[in-house]
Image (spheres, helix red, strand yellow):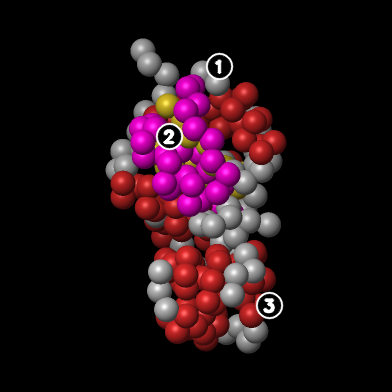
C-alpha cells in the first residue's frame, strides 16, 4: 500500500525540517513551502493527499490558501497546525474546508494521529481545544459565530498591508487599482471599529491573518 503523500507549509524552516523528520517514517513528504502563495501555486502539481499548514504565513495566509487549494483539489485533506488557540479561528478553518486543527504545542504524536484519521475520511481537533465540549466538536466549532468579519479579498489586502506594503504596492500584487485597495482598507476599519492603520495591523497579527 502506498504511503499517503504529504505537503508541509510553514514560514519557519526549523519547523518544516522537524515536521518532515517526524512524518517521513510513516508518510511520503513530497513538498515543503514557506509561504501561502508558493503553497497555492506549487501544491496542486504534487498531488498530495494531505496538506499540513500554518495559518499565519507570508504573502497569503493559510486560511485563504487552504480555501483555494480545496477548490483546486477537492479531495485533499487540510490539517492546520498553528499557535492560534481561538475557537472562532478553528471554526473558520473548518468552514473553509479543514479536516483537522492542532496546536503547535500539542503532543508530538498527535499530528500523525490526526493525519491517519483524516486519510480515513474523519476529522480531528486537538483535545487542548475540545475539553468539556459536548457532541461533535467539528459541528460545535462550525456553529460558532465567526469573529472574522472580513471578506477573502479584504484578508488579502490586510495581509499585504500588514507586511508593510503601501496601498499602491498592494494594488500591484493583487492586480487592482489603488482606489480598490483603499476601499477595502477603510471598509475593514469601519466594520471592525478600528481607527488607525496600526490598529488594523495589530488586528491582523492577533487573528493570525499574517505571520508573527
Residue under numbered circle 1: 25
The residue to which callout 2 is attached is: 50
Question: x and y percent of residue 29 in the render?
Answer: 50, 26
Q: Nearer the viewer, residue 117 or 171?
A: 171
Q: Residue at x 47, y 80 (%)?
A: 178
Residue 93 to residue 161: above or below = above
| First along the sequence among labels 1 and 3 | 1
Q: Which span of residues is magenta-colored?
A: 27-56
Please tell me which residue lies in front, 157 or 190: 157
Of helix, strand and loop, which one carries label 2?
strand
Q: Residue 112 at what x, y percent from top left?
A: 54, 27
- In the rendered image, residue 12 lying in the magenta stretch gets the answer no
Residue, disc 3: 198
Question: Which of the two labelled residues, at mark 3 and mark 2, occupies the earlier sequence position?
Answer: 2
Q: CA distance from mark 1 to mark 3?
A: 45 Å
User: Dot 2 surroundings within 10 Å: few (below 14), some, or many (20 or more)?
Assistant: many
* Label 1 crowd (10 A; few <14 / some 14-19 / many >=20): few
Residue 23 is situated, as x and y percent measured from the top left of the image, at 56, 24
Helix, strand or loop status at disc 3: helix
Residue at left offset 42%, top offset 39%: 43
Q: CA distance from mark 1 to mark 2?
A: 16 Å
Asked if residue 46 is positioned above or below residue 4 in the image, the reply reads below
Q: Residue at x 40, y 74 (%)?
A: 176
| Number of the front mark, 3 or 2 | 3
- Left or right, 66 with reference to 164: left
Secondary structure under tag 1 reads: loop
Query: Mark 1 or 3, which is nearer the eye?
Result: 3
Amino acid at each position: 500500500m502506498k504511503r499517503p503523500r504529504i505537503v508541509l507549509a510553514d514560514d519557519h524552516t526549523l519547523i518544516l525540517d522537524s515536521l518532515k523528520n517526524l512524518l517521513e517514517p510513516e508518510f511520503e513528504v513530497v513538498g515543503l513551502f514557506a509561504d501561502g502563495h508558493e503553497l497555492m501555486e506549487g501544491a496542486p502539481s504534487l498531488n498530495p493527499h494531505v496538506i499540513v499548514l500554518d495559518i499565519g504565513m507570508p504573502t497569503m495566509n493559510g486560511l485563504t490558501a487552504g480555501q483555494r487549494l480545496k477548490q483546486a483539489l477537492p479531495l485533499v485533506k487540510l490539517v492546520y497546525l498553528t499557535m492560534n488557540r481561538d475557537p472562532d479561528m478553528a471554526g473558520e478553518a473548518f468552514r473553509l474546508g479543514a479536516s483537522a486543527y492542532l496546536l503547535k504545542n500539542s503532543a508530538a504524536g498527535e499530528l500523525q494521529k490526526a493525519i491517519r484519521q483524516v486519510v480515513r475520511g474523519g476529522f480531528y481537533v486537538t483535545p487542548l481545544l475540545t475539553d468539556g465540549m459536548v457532541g461533535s466538536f467539528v459541528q460545535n466549532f462550525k456553529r460558532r459565530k465567526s469573529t472574522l468579519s472580513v471578506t477573502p479579498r479584504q484578508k488579502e489586502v490586510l495581509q499585504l498591508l500588514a507586511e508593510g506594503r503601501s496601498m499602491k504596492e498592494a494594488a500591484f500584487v493583487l492586480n487592482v487599482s489603488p482606489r480598490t485597495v483603499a476601499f477595502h482598507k477603510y471598509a475593514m476599519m469601519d466594520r471592525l471599529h478600528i481607527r488607525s492603520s496600526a490598529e488594523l495591523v495589530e488586528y491582523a497579527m492577533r487573528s493570525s491573518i499574517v505571520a508573527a
